């Protein structure tokens, strides 16, 4: 097995993200709704108990809002879905991309991972083949694609019952609410308002947009996958790149990647 990183790997640098490649002797079988499983694995890898408790219980606060400021992709690799069994099976290997606006999150995560030989994901034992660090800085006009669905919603009270409305990229509120969310994330992280608060996200015409329905612990969440262009404040664009666009990022939503020669995108 290829050796990954180093046992003394202490600092992966500012605003990077990591790609973890898992390999397995037999196919990796998961419930198709596996977001909560990956989220639990990531939190268990954090090798500082106080920080782990902070991320799990609190996160970064502004007003009455709390943000965890990390996100992760769907598992990427060759897969087969069995609708009857409600399972997804990955063959040979699978990759997971994790991003965070907080350098400490990835440092603790990597140092927690490299001391392990085997990892349990669901009922499967997998091996870590390697961990790769990447570092892109996005500019206004950057084209991105989703590695997990972007979810944007509002909650209303109608006849004493809560109703949730999920917005699509075809509605103005989609871009407006993502911008407001990014400003709040910036304030939560840096305790100040961004100098430039401009932001706009638009889907790329002639690209394929698709609505995805994810069930997270019995909660139905709707999101969108596709290709988008980001314009506006470089600070807000990159906090979105590092911590996720839209809501529920720490549950595996809103992870984006930079389009590079329209590289192959394999996402369940």
Image (tube, rainbow, N blue to C red):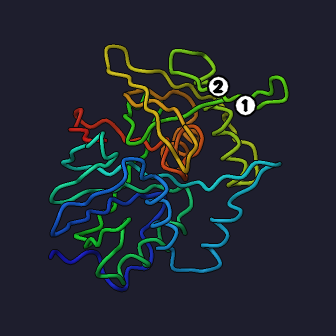
Instruction: Determine whether, in the image, residue 151 is placed left or right of residue 80.
Output: right
Instruction: Determine whether, in the image, residue 157 is placed left or right of residue 177.
Output: right
- Is 88 located above or below residue 160 in the figure? below
Residue 26 in the image: x percent, y percent? 16, 66
Front residue of 181 and 190: 181
Tell me the number on the disc at residue 194.
none
Residue 250 in the image: x percent, y percent? 55, 53
Front residue of 103 and 79: 79
- Is 212 located above or below residue 45 in the figure? above
* The N terminus - image quarter: bottom left
Which residue occupies 65% across, 72% down?
Answer: 53
- SS at mark 2? strand
Tell me the number on the disc at residue 155.
1
Which residue occupies 31% across, 41% down?
Answer: 268
Quarter of image, res 97: bottom left
Q: Report which residue position mark 2 lands on.
A: 165
Residue 235 in the image: x percent, y percent? 58, 42
């Amino acid at each position: 097995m290829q050796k990954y990183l180093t046992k003394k790997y202490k600092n992966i640098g500012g605003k990077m993200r990591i790609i973890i490649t898992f390999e397995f002797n037999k196919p990796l079988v998961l419930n198709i709704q596996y977001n909560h499983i990956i989220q639990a694995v990531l939190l268990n890898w954090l090798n500082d108990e106080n920080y782990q408790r902070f991320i799990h219980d609190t996160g970064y606060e502004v007003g009455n809002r709390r943000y965890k400021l990390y996100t992760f992709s769907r598992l990427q690799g060759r897969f087969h879905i069995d609708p009857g069994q409600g399972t997804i099976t990955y063959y040979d290997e699978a990759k997971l991309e994790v991003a965070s606006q907080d350098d400490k999150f990835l440092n603790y995560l990597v140092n927690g991972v490299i001391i392990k030989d085997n990892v349990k994901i669901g009922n499967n034992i997998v091996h870590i083949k390697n961990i790769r660090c990447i570092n892109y800085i996005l500019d206004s006009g950057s084209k991105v694609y989703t590695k997990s669905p972007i979810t944007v919603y509002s909650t209303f009270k109608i006849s004493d019952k809560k109703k949730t409305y999920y917005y699509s990229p075809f509605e103005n509120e989609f871009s407006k609410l993502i911008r407001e969310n990014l400003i709040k994330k910036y304030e939560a992280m840096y305790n100040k308002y961004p100098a430039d608060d401009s932001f706009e996200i638009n889907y790329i015409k002639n690209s394929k947009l698709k609505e995805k329905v994810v069930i997270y612990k019995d909660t139905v969440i709707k999101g969108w996958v596709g290709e988008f262009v980001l314009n506006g404040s470089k600070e807000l664009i990159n906090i979105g790149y590092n911590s996720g666009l839209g809501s529920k990022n720490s549950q595996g939503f809103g992870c984006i990647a930079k389009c590079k020669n329209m590289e192959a995108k394999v996402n369940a």
